[in-house]
Image (cartoon, rainbow, N blue to C red):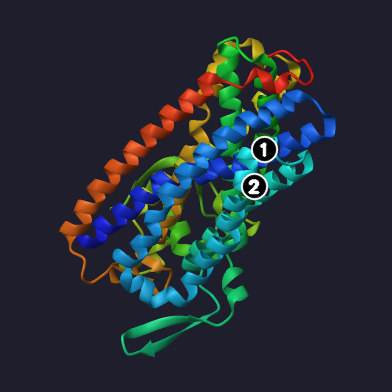
Amino acid sequence: MDVVLLSRIQFAVTIGFHYIYPPLSIGLGLALVIMEGLYLKTGEAIYNQMTRFWVRIFGLIFALGVGTGIVMEFEFGTNWAAYSRFVGDIFGSPLAAEGIFAFFLESGFLAILLFGWDRVGRKMHFFSTVMVALGAHFSAIWIIVANSWMQTPTAYHVVDTAVGPRAEILSFWGAVFNPSTLDRLLHTLMGAWQSGAFFLISVGAFYLLRNQHHAFARRSMSVGFALAMVASLAQLGSGHSSAQVVAEHQPVKLAAFEGIYATGAEAELAIMGWVNEEDKTVTGIKLPGMLSWLVGGTTDTVVKGLDDYPVADHPPVQTSFQLYHLMVAVGMGLIGLAWAGGLLAWRGWLFRSRPLLWILVFSVLLPQAANQLGWAAAEVGRQPWIVYGLMRTADAVSPNVSAGMVLTSLILFTLVYVALFFVFIALLDQKIRKGPLAEDLVASGEEL
């Protein structure tokens, strides 16, 4: 097999497994701040019980996130040495910032969060919870900065060196605030918030189906629904804004997402369909003029098509189209589920419907699916560029790494990641079945 394809598959496997955990830790970190804040404000022991239970879950997720994320940074040197040499001056800055400002902040206060309940005061513990949540969010910020620069590179110039051309940074903040950073960051964070929110909802629904921990389950679900309702609508807005940035700075990617070949106004928006790449059409459900209206606010907006670009610069159209539309479909489903579930819970009807509770138990998978699909769509749609318009993926691999080496490491990494995932599921199942501890409610005498 081709070393470039194998290296891409290996990175996709490692980041795919890793990306299970950071969205959960980001969303759950925010939920912990809400829960413990409510405990400090109201003094109700149920919020203390909720915080202590979910902190134990957070610790497990954090550990798996750190363990699965280390490999990717090594891959930049082993598999993508040419890329690292070309953009190391720029790409290394946000990665270093992520380690200094995010990981150290998060891990530094994590010990107090996990073990400081009876060793520090309530306010100090809450401060630690806030710092851990901020650390998780800062980690996302710097990773998105690095990836967004690869999508829409700015504030750089290319210089010739003895070992070949090299991109050098002209302005750190110019690179940080490249055209796509803010929209992609908000979109990513809203996906993470939904991951944490539906995790709370899923576990709460599980307890209600088992007729256990009723107060805990309902309060956890209330926090989850409130967070999911806000995040799902914000996700829709950030997705629209992000698509407009793609239309301006990566028009060939947008054309692939929608299967648009001919440049023109009144461009159709595909709801679902199949790209016929030979005759350059999309068969399916389409809304006339809607894509032009979404991009520019009027159906007269001209949308560039794939035919305006060399075939060598086209991403895999069918794959990009399907990944993007599946992500949108799941995202719209999450909006409906969050708002319908939240309103039914507010009316008290949800907690009496076993079919709806079963749906909510499995709803935890939907944000994960949307996150994975969205990330894959963004990366596949950028091809054949690893840095858009500057460096092709085929030119970024390490020249001295063979296909056999990559295949061997791919197999071994996959086995390790699968094993870690099953360990995570087993430990998570154990903690959830054990449930919240009764002694955390003794202070107020509330019942489970």
- Tag 2 and tag 1, C-beta contact below 8 Å: yes
- Outermost residue to the front: 119
Residue highlighted by disc 2: 133
* Residue 94 relative to residue 117: left or right: left
Picture quarter containing residue 205? top right
* Residue 94 relative to residue 322: left or right: right
* Element type at mark 1: helix
Of the numbered discs 2 and 1, the one sitting upstream in the chain is: 1
Q: Residue at x 62, y 21 (%)?
A: 437
Q: Residue 368: where, in percent of width, then height?
A: 48, 38
Graded by Cα atoms within 10 Å as few (under 14), some (14 to 19) or many (20 or more), the crowding at tag 2 reads: many
Kind of residue indicated by mark 2: Ala
* Residue 289 in view (yes/no): no
Q: Residue at x 38, y 36 (%)?
A: 421
Q: Which mark is residue 127?
A: none
Camera-side residue of 287 and 417: 417
As drawn, 279 above or below 333: below
Camera-side residue of 422 and 264: 422
Considering the image in quadrants, where does the C terminus appear? top right
Kind of residue indicated by mark 1: Leu
Residue highlighted by disc 1: 32
* Residue 367 relative to residue 79: left or right: right
Considering the image in quadrants, where does the N terminus appear? bottom left
Picture quarter containing residue 245? bottom right
* Element type at mark 2: helix
- Outermost residue to the right: 42
As drawn, 215 above or below 70: above
Picture quarter containing residue 398? bottom left
Q: Residue 112: where, in percent of width, then height?
A: 65, 44
Q: Residue 446: where, in percent of width, then height?
A: 76, 15
